[in-house]
Image: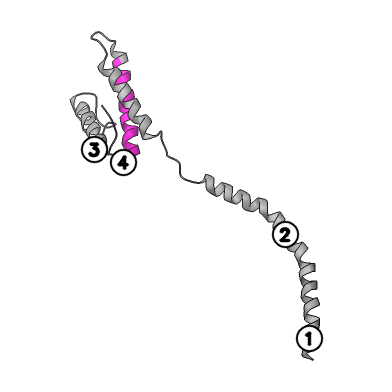
Amino acid sequence: MADATGSVAGPLVLFAVVSIAPSALFWCALRVPAVYRWLRDRRREQPRPAGPPVERLSADLRRVHRVLASYPPGTPAARRIGTRQAYDELLQTACRAVGVEHRLESLPEGIDRDLERLRIEESLRREGLAVP
């Protein structure tokens, strides 16, 4: 009896593999594009920085600070104010990038705001950012 069962099991397994294999391969072929899209989308979801790179921020801060410091006497006030506002925006962006607290938005133009700029510049230096 064992001999008869063993002889039937071989062809039966072979028949099962031959009849199921094409369906399984076809099912896998249909799933490959979906798996590829899933993997591709998953790689894209890596977090991206919210702002510009800190190297560019540092270079922009130095450039705008140089421009602001190089204005000769008699430069129109609108130009000075605009450049100072651009510098303040860059400082705020740099603070967000490295996690430094600031109060530039809440302080009016004057001595307090100038002191806050100096404090921020020093804090950014301590965080490793090359600022003027």
Crowd class of label 2 (few under 14; some 14 to 19; many from 20; radius 10 Å):
few
Query: Identity of the amino acid at label 1?
Result: Thr
Assign the C terminus to one quadrant of the image: top left
Q: Circle 1 is placed at which residue position?
A: 5
Mark 2 touches mark 1? (CB < 8 Å): no
Assign the N terminus to one quadrant of the image: bottom right
Residue 130 placement (x, y as % from top left): 28, 31
Helix, strand or loop for disc 3: helix
Q: Is residue 102 above or below residue 83?
A: below
Which of disc 1 and disc 3 is earlier in sequence? 1
Q: Circle 3 is placed at which residue position?
A: 126
Query: Identity of the amino acid at label 4?
Result: Gly
Query: Identity of the amino acid at label 2?
Result: Trp
CA separation, marks 4 and 1? 75 Å
Helix, strand or loop for disc 2: helix
Residue range (magenta): 80-105
What residue is shown at x 79% (from left), y 77% (from top)?
12
Kindly identify which numbered label has been placed on residue 49: none
Crowd class of label 4 (few under 14; some 14 to 19; many from 20; radius 10 Å):
few
Which of disc 1 and disc 4 is earlier in sequence? 1
CA separation, marks 4 and 2? 50 Å
Q: Circle 2 is placed at which residue position?
A: 27
Kindly identify which numbered label has been placed on residue 99: 4
Residue 51 placement (x, y as % from top left): 41, 35
CA separation, marks 3 and 1? 81 Å
CA separation, marks 3 and 2? 58 Å
Position of residue 1 in the picture relative to residue 98 (left or right): right
CA separation, marks 3 and 4? 12 Å
State whether residue 85 appears in this view. Answer: no
Position of residue 83 in the picture relative to residue 22 (left or right): left
Q: Is residue 2 above or below residue 60?
A: below
Crowd class of label 1 (few under 14; some 14 to 19; many from 20; radius 10 Å):
few
